[in-house]
Image (tube, helix red, strand yellow):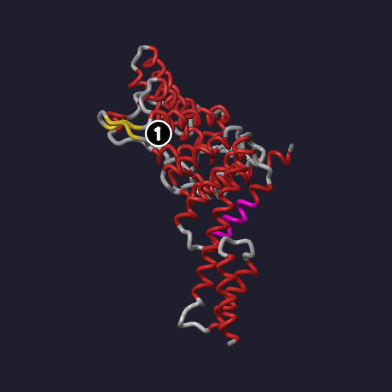
Amino acid sequence: MKRKCIAVSLVAMAFASALQTAFCDVNSPSSTIRYATDAYPGFDREEKILSSSKKTPRWFSWLRGPKKDNAADQFAWAGECEKNGAWSKALKAYDAIVRNWPASPEAPKAQQRVAELYLEKELDSEEAFNEYKYLIDFYSSQCAYDEIVFKLYEVAKLMEEEGKYFVFFHFDNTVDVRRAFEAVVLRAPGAAFAPEAMMKVAKLREDELEFEKASLVYETLRSLHPYSAEAKTALYREAQCRMKLLRAHQYNRGRAKDVLAFLKSALAANPPDDVKADLETWLAETTGIIEDEAFAAAKFYDSRTRTKRSAINAYEKFLVEYPASSHTAEARARLAELEKSSNQ
């Protein structure tokens, strides 16, 4: 029991330091395996994703501040406003508790009610997300963490579905939604829905044409959740991303060899037949790219500015390394010509 208390205290101290708050009593949630300070390649690492900005009392407190002298009375008054249908006034009243009495027993309850009102009244899904995130960041030990972080995930999905509206025009808020899912994963990396959330992050990276970062997220997903259903899909989509990058940078031999090794490894994992067929096609394409580059390098030495011996060595090396290439016949024929002329 003593060891458990010490462990929990250490986690609380580390997390509290990361959030830089004096009044927050933070414990490790039951769904957490990793923490927000761990690296998630392909994620944004901005401060607003890692932590929330601490709420402070508003200016002109006589107009926008609390209407009562203490948190308990303010909370009761906010409840009365709700019962009377004055939910906008109630929202401000609850928020005033968090800003003015952040360490009070009423503060976490008030913060949760702020988030719930934003969601219940369909005011703004993004604001609802930020308010739930604030509850987790500053009152994690004073709320039902697993329940709230799942709600955070549900709101992130709602943001993805709704997008944003500007006047009468709808557009996808890809970056904001992606960061919302990243925030969820950082706060509950061990949750059952974490692999699905990471898939959404990676797909949104693809929507942004950030295939390098998408590939990193897929790779991390497979590493952290190797037995999840999403891991199999991530393997295929990572291969797709790698191929897109390879086609855009065909003359990067190092990248081509990395992709070749990855595809061979993916095929060794016994993927489903439909996935296997694509992987084999991409493997052949990647092999062709490498062979084309190698043959072009060999031909580079077969010019008037180079010696015949250099060209012969280049073609011999190519034939040793790529004996089954589509360029093999041409290389052998040219090698024979060079050897014949050098012997004359």
Main secondary structure type of the part rendered in magenta: helix
Spot occupied by residue 123 in the image (x, y as percentages of width and height): 35, 25
Q: Residues within 10 Å of mark 1 (few under 14, many from 20)?
A: some
Q: Is residue 97 visible?
A: no
Spot occupied by residue 49 in the image (x, y as percentages of width and height): 46, 43
What residue is rendered at 54% in x and 72% in y? 298
Residue named by callout 1: 99
| Quarter occupied by the C terminus | bottom right
Residue 227 found in image quarter: top right
What residue is rendered at 46% in x and 37% in y? 180
Which portion, as a residue range, is magenta?
Answer: 256-264
Instruction: In the rendered view, tell whether residue 332 sits above or below residue 133.
Output: below
What residue is rendered at 57% in x and 36% in y? 194
- The residue closer to the viewer here, 196 or 313, is 313
Spot occupied by residue 243 in the image (x, y as percentages of width and height): 51, 51
Q: Among all residues in the image, which is located at the extreme left? A: 167
Q: Is residue 261 magenta?
A: yes
Instruction: In the rendered view, tell whether residue 40 sits above or below residue 166.
Output: below
- The residue closer to the viewer here, 281 or 261, is 281
Element assignment for label 1: helix
Spot occupied by residue 88 in the image (x, y as percentages of width and height): 33, 21
Q: Among all residues in the image, which is located at the extreme bottom? A: 344
Q: What residue type is labelled 1?
A: Arg
